[in-house]
Image (tube, helix red, strand yellow):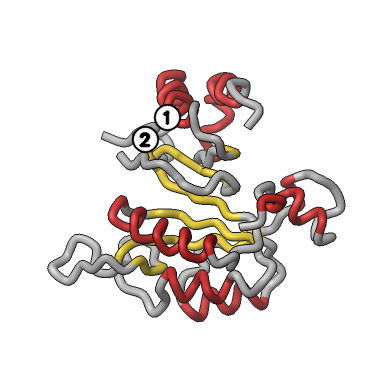
Amino acid sequence: MAEQWGNLLDYCLQLGLIPEKDAIHVTWAHGANSLREMEEALRGPAMVLEADVTVEGLNTQNQTNVPIMAHPPAIYSDNTLQHWLNTVTQSQKGIKLDFKSLESLSPSLDILTAADSQNQINQPVWLNADILRGPNVPNFVQPVNFPTVTVSPGWLTLYVPLLAVKPYTQLMVEEMAALVRDLPQRITFPVRAVLLRASWLHFSWLLSQSPR
């Protein structure tokens, strides 16, 4: 992966996709998992494709070690990570991979490592996973080998209006800070927006811990 494209905003700005270095201008295609969804997203105006990764047949007797593009509860797909990556890297779209199972991480990193070593990836890559327990919920941290990716670790959360509405806590963000403190990559934190305002003091503290 090209070192200069580790930063998504720099990449989009250089291509003339956004008028200024502000993330509000970046557009996303979410759930570009199946062949049809992937191809539609590639033809569309979105600047970044987000897709979900698990393993085929997760938690069944038919489980394999093959990373596929599917969002739980789906455990089968007509699209593998290998094919998805081969296809999307031929475009200029940014990439965000959302890992939905621990089992998918190691074989997926093998695929990414191979693609990176062959200089196949020439766009920014974000790697996302919910690795900590977050609000209203009654682990998967492994080293990431690519210093130019953006790591996007999150919290598993639940929100039910009037019932499950507790915000993120200082302890939750301190746990996250401890986990990512020594990573060399840029970091972005995906959060449940409806809970963010009530938790902003804690997230402000988290963001102040590193210029990354």
Q: Quadrant of the C terminus?
A: top right
**Residue beneath label 1, please?**
179
- How dense is the environment of label 2, judged by Cα within 10 Å: few (below 14), some, or many (20 and up)? some
x and y percent of residue 55 in the render? 30, 64
Which of marks 2 and 1 precedes in the sequence? Answer: 2
Q: Amino acid at mark 1?
A: Leu
Rendering coords of residue 191 (x, y %): 51, 39
Q: Nearer the viewer, residue 117 or 159?
A: 117
Tag 1 secondary structure:
helix
Residue at point 69% right, 62% down?
47
Q: Quadrant of residue 27?
A: bottom right
Front position in the image: 155 or 110: 110
Using the numbered discs, state the Cα–Cα distance from disc 1 to disc 2 in whole angstroms: 10 Å
Residue 199 badge: none
Q: Residue at x 66, y 51 (%)?
A: 3
Residue for badge 2: 132
Q: Is residue 166 above or below residue 46?
A: above
* Residue at image location 58% in from the left, 21% down from the top: 209
Left or right of 123 on screen, residue 111: left
Disc 1 to disc 2: CB gap under 8 Å: yes
Q: Amino acid at mark 2?
A: Leu
